[in-house]
Image: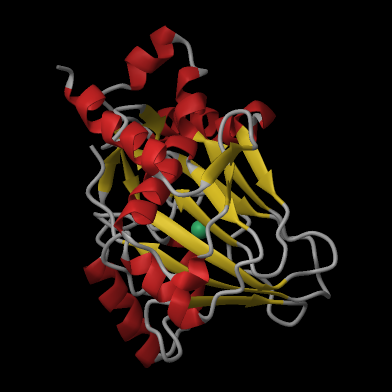
Amino acid sequence: MNINVAKASWTQAALAAAPFEVERVGRSLGAEIHGLDLKKGLDERSFRGLEAALIENKVIYLRDQHLTTAQHVEISRWFGALEVHPFRPEGEFPEIMVLDNHKDNPVLSTDVWHSDTTFRATPTKYTILRSQIIPRTGGDTLWCDMEAAYNGLSETFRAMIGGLKARHDFQNFRVLFTRSDEDQKRLRRMEELYPNPVHPLVRTHPVTGAKCIYVNPQFTIGVEGLHKDESDVLLKLLFEQVHVPEYQFRFRWTEGAIVFWDNQSTQHYAANDYYPDRRRMERTAVCGDAPV
Ligand SMILES: [Fe+2]
């Protein structure tokens, strides 16, 4: 039996046994979960169903959950070990990253398409984001289905990029470090922690076996083995695929919603269009594996 069929079949079984409904909302990706109260916590059956729904739909959400931070962390732990974000750990829960943006604290680079932390050798597997304060208008999150984007390329082009690898860097976050001695020391520690990993241009999803484009304009700095001008042209073409509306899913937040997404098969972008209103979110991230 094909190993991917065997692996993927657990998701169908888990979905069939799930004690909730999954409503597909986006054509290519995105589904709403109905009939599950996360405040009551998860059990083995609901967790397996939720992870299966996440893998199959790439982005899933539940509205009107209004979880506490502790409940958010507890739910997240079912999905695996949680990351402590290297840039902005704060508060009582080190696994929580607070995203609190308004006119006096604009976003830092969340409005550039990316898959989370590909500057790590083992980038984030799943991200789980909960809304607390939502602007009157704007502040949507958009995702792109990188499997659909890959399948949209010609067979010849797919064959050309199949074996290529690209280097990644936390480049846009470097502005967080000032010229002070202390900050420069922290920056050097960051560089030691995350020394420019090389990932395949095309990643194979560990469960579904689907091939997905795995370069992004936020963190990918160059294709290995190409001249800079060659690399620039190739990356530009691959980066542009996220702009195809047919591959996208756009989510209008409501307070108390929670969204889970699979960074292995998607990229995302937070629309930066709501100031002076405030948008406050809390985020957890599940540790992933080295992409293959
Ligand atoms: Fe992100």
The residue positioned farthest toward the left in the image shown: 1
Residue 92, placed above or below residue 29: below
Going by the image, does 21 lie left or right of 189? Answer: right
251 or 186, nearer to the observer: 251
36 or 265, nearer to the observer: 36
Res. 174 image quadrant = bottom left
Residue 265, placed above or below residue 192: above
92 or 277, nearer to the observer: 92
The residue positioned farthest toward the top in the image shown: 156
Res. 138 image quadrant = bottom right
Q: Residue at x 33, y 13 (%)?
A: 159
Q: Residue at x 18, y 18 (%)?
A: 2
Q: Quadrant of the N terminus?
A: top left
Q: Quadrant of the C terminus?
A: top left
Residue 143's spot in the image, x, y percent?
58, 44
Residue 156's spot in the image, x, y percent?
40, 8
Q: Residue at x 26, y 45 (%)?
A: 198
Residue 266's spot in the image, x, y percent?
48, 41
Going by the image, does 9 lie left or right of 228? Answer: left
Q: How is the image coloured?
A: secondary structure
Residue 5's spot in the image, x, y percent?
25, 23
Residue 282, placed above or below residue 93: above
Going by the image, does 148 lie left or right of 207? Answer: right
Res. 109 image quadrant = bottom right
Q: Residue at x 32, y 63 (%)?
A: 78
115 or 32, nearer to the observer: 32
Instruction: Please say whether residue 228 is visible from this viewpoint.
Output: yes
Instruction: Please say whether residue 202 is visible from this viewpoint.
Output: no
The number of callouts visible is 0
